[in-house]
Structure formats: C-alpha cells, structure tokens
Amino acid sequence: MTLHSRLSSSTKIPSFEFVSEATTINRSALGYHGRPSTFGPLKFSSHGIKTGVSSRRIGCFAALSPELKTTLDKVVTSHKVILFMKGTKDFPQCGFSNTVVSILKAVDVPFETVNILENDFLRQGLKEYSQWPTFPQLYIDGEFFGGCDITVDAYKSGELQELLEKASLS
C-alpha cells in the first residue's frame, strides 16, 4: 500500500490518496500532483493550491482535519506495526526514533515507518490524532502504543513482545 500526501509548501493544505496495487482507495481531488519524495513503501509528495493563508498562520488552525484523520485511521489499521518517526528505519534522524527502530528490529517484527520530517502538516496532525506531543509514535494492531520511553519500558518487561506476538496472530 502506498500513501501519497499532497501538501503545498506555501499553503500547507493536505490531501492524501491510498493506492493498493493499481487501485485507488481514497483520493482528495485538490489539484496537480508534484514529484514524490520516497521513504520506504510509504510516499509523500508536494501539491500546490492557493488559498491566501500564509504558512506562518497555519499554526492557528487545527492540524487534524477530518480528511487527515480518515487517512491516519486507514494507515494505522492497514499495518500490524507502524512507527511514525524522524527519519526512516534505515536512517533514523533522532536518537529516540533510533532506539525504537532498534527494539523493533531486535524483536524481529516486520514494521513500516513514516518519516514525519517530510510533512509538517502530518507531523502536527499526528500530535492531535494520538494526543501525544512527541515522536516517535508506535502503533500496534491499529492502536497507539506510545513513544520511546513507553516502548523501552515495555520491551524490558516483556510486555512489548507479548503484544507484538498477539498482533501477529490476529
């Protein structure tokens, strides 16, 4: 599954489209599709729309639009384990993200990552979506699990391994 995010650097208006194989699952028709930047199997790209809203004022608006919430619901439920992080699993750009990636690799569980540094609107929306202010954010079996500290504690106690085993069986 591929997730395309379209976001104008000047207006910060998002739209997303899911593509499974060659079939579009959900698409917001907001205009032209720019060159994608890829990280792992999930892709985000640029998209331009003029609204007259400056990027400085975007912080005054709720970042979690209904469209973004729907998209995030689909993304977190379409993967058993997904990590929203700074960087990628092959090149983490934050020590906390690197720690969680190392733990997931240590327990040998397949997982997807989304580089939240690629899309500021996604990064801000995720904070509202999870009601968690920091990254990384780990989702297991469609549910928010926690950030780095919670993941480390759960790994040390064995709780994380149990939860991941249950998720892989469901």
Image: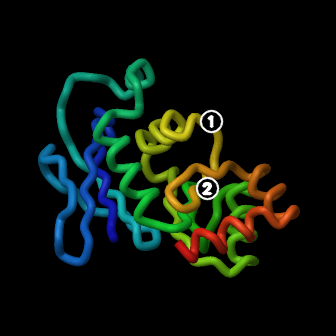
User: What is the x, y in percent for residue 132?
Assistant: 62, 37
Q: Are marks 2 and 1 in contact (CB under 8 Å)?
A: no
129 left or right of 157? left
Question: Of callouts 2 and 1, which one flags the residue occurring earlier in the amino acid sequence?
Answer: 1
Q: How dense is the environment of label 1, judged by Cα within 10 Å: few (below 14), some, or many (20 and up)?
A: some
Cα distance, mark 2 to mark 1?
13 Å
Query: For mark 1, what is the residue?
Result: 133
Q: Residue furthest right?
A: 156
Q: Residue visible at 30% across and 45% down?
A: 7
Q: Quadrant of residue 83?
A: bottom right
User: What is the x, y in percent for residue 5?
Assistant: 31, 53
Q: Residue visible at 44% across and 24% down?
A: 59
- Above or below: residue 20 compared with residue 58: below
Q: Secondary structure at mark 2?
A: strand
Q: Quadrant of residue 65?
A: top left
Query: For mark 2, what is the residue?
Result: 138
Q: Quadrant of residue 152?
A: bottom right
Q: How many marks?
A: 2
Q: Please say which color scheme the image uses.
A: rainbow
Of the residues shown, which amino acid type is indicated by label 2? Leu
Query: Looking at the rendered structure, which numbered label has been put on residue 168?
Result: none
Q: Residue visible at 33% across and 68% down?
A: 2
- Above or below: residue 20 compared with residue 117: below
140 left or right of 70? right
3 left or right of 132? left
Of the residues shown, which amino acid type is indicated by label 1? Pro
Q: Secondary structure at mark 1?
A: loop
In this rendering, the label closer to the viewer, 2 or 1: 2
